[in-house]
């Protein structure tokens, strides 16, 4: 069968057939996530129209639309899981506490952690943004405030993770531990079709991605590593070229497909880095590892970190296995 006619749902059912014992829950859960991504993709398309209206000064585009779109995206995920019987609570960058999903109270085997809209600073300049999700099994028999502590879960415990990318095309990339697969939204039928089966990240790349604006504040290991990448050495394909979009999902997706390394290190202003562990670093770390890559905070694999708070930040070095290993040698 032609790849382009395999829908997300059908692919998940085909995968399920290969893994007896896998219930249909993942296909339902990822279909709910796909629904949220389609909703957000549509809203982002309309934001441009709002911008036009906003130009007449009726709407404060910067704050209002940006705020709205973060909230709208958050709401799209809450709505997509409502009454879906699978997700009991959602943890989101946009909400301080875990939020029960309407209609699933005391039901739902999964808790989902989301960055509903990643790359917000790029929203009003029409640059690619994304959503990131991480799925854990809900700890058994935990109620009320005890849930928060019970949700301090290591990335190794994720059962699924991935992201949507709202760019020239809307794509959905996920892993359930059986490799990494990418789908592209065909708007004419309103469905995601298989476009990147079994994505593998190159062992080593030739690009690096970091916010060079912070160069003068970088801690020595960061500076030493980036200086190393900028030296000339044909044998190790240096100097690398720099690419930085400023939306983590877009910078990560390019790194996943082309190879190379993305870094958001700690610096004097961001003692523990800027990116959040539970719904940015850990899900992308799962995807990276499943594609043969690597993700670390400089000293340990991201997926080994046991969080002490739900919105904890972490330094992140992620991408081709050899590139991340080279980077880590500067931090040890
Ligand atoms: P979010 O929009 O979800 O807050 O995430 C923004 C993050 C991430 O997308 C990106 O890698 C990083 O912010 C860029 O930060 P700088 O502007 O400091 O480079
Ligand atoms: Mn983000
Ligand atoms: Mn966000």
Image: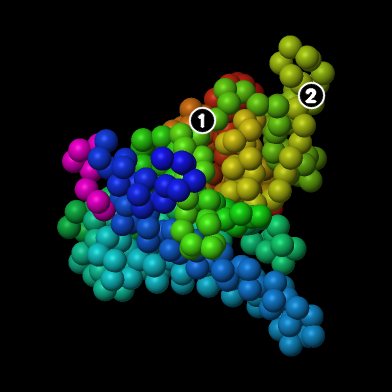
Report the residue at 43% width, 63% height from top.
Answer: 35
Dominant secondary structure of the residues highlighted in magenta in the image: loop
Q: Which residues are magenta?
A: 19-25
Circle on res. 239: 2
Q: Is residue 21 magenta?
A: yes
Q: Tag count in the figure?
A: 2
Q: Circle 1 is placed at which residue position?
A: 200
Q: CA distance from mark 1 to mark 2?
A: 24 Å
What kind of element bears circle 1?
Answer: loop
175 and 311: which is toward the camera: 175
78 and 97: which is toward the camera: 78
94 and 219: which is toward the camera: 94
84 left or right of 185 in image: left
- Residue 30 lies, with reference to residue 290, above or below; the image says below
36 and 237: which is toward the camera: 36
Task: Write down the quadrant of residue 31 in the picture.
Answer: bottom left
What kind of element bears circle 2?
Answer: loop
* Residue 308 in view here: no
The percent position of residue 61, horizontal first and vertical second, equals 72, 76
Report the residue at 59% width, 42% height from top.
Answer: 253
């Amino acid at each position: 069968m032609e790849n382009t006619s395999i829908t997300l749902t059908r692919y998940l059912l085909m995968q399920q057939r290969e893994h007896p014992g896998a219930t249909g829950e993942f296909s339902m859960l990822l279909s709910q996530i796909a629904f949220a991504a389609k909703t957000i993709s549509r809203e982002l398309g309309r934001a441009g129209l709002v911008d036009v209206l906003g130009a007449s000064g009726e709407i404060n585009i910067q704050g209002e639309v940006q705020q709205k779109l973060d909230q709208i995206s958050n709401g799209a995920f809450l709505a997509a899981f409502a009454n879906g019987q699978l997700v009991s609570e959602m943890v989101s960058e946009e909400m301080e506490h875990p939020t029960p999903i309407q209609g699933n109270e005391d039901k739902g085997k999964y808790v989902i952690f989301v960055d509903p809209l990643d790359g917000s600073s790029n929203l009003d300049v029409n640059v690619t943004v994304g959503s990131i999700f991480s799925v854990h099994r809900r700890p058994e028999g935990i109620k009320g405030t005890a849930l928060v502590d019970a949700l301090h879960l290591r990335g190794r415990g994720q059962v699924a993770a991935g992201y949507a990318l709202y760019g020239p095309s809307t794509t959905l990339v996920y892993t359930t531990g059986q490799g990494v697969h990418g789908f592209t939204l065909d708007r004419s039928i309103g469905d995601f079709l298989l476009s990147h089966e079994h994505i593998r990240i190159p062992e080593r790349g030739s690009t690096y991605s970091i916010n060079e604006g912070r160069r003068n504040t970088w801690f020595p290991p960061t500076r030493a590593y980036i200086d190393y990448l900028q030296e000339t050495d044909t044998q190790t394909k240096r100097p690398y070229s720099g690419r930085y979009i400023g939306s983590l999902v877009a910078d990560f997706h390019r790194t996943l497909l082309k190879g190379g390394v993305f870094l958001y290190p700690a610096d004097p202003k961001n003692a523990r880095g800027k990116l959040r562990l539970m719904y940015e670093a850990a899900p992308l770390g799962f995807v990276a590892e499943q594609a043969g890559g690597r993700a670390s905070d400089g000293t340990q694999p991201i997926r080994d970190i046991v969080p002490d708070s739900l919105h904890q930040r972490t330094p992140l070095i992620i991408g081709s296995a050899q590139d991340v290993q080279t980077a880590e040698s500067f931090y040890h």
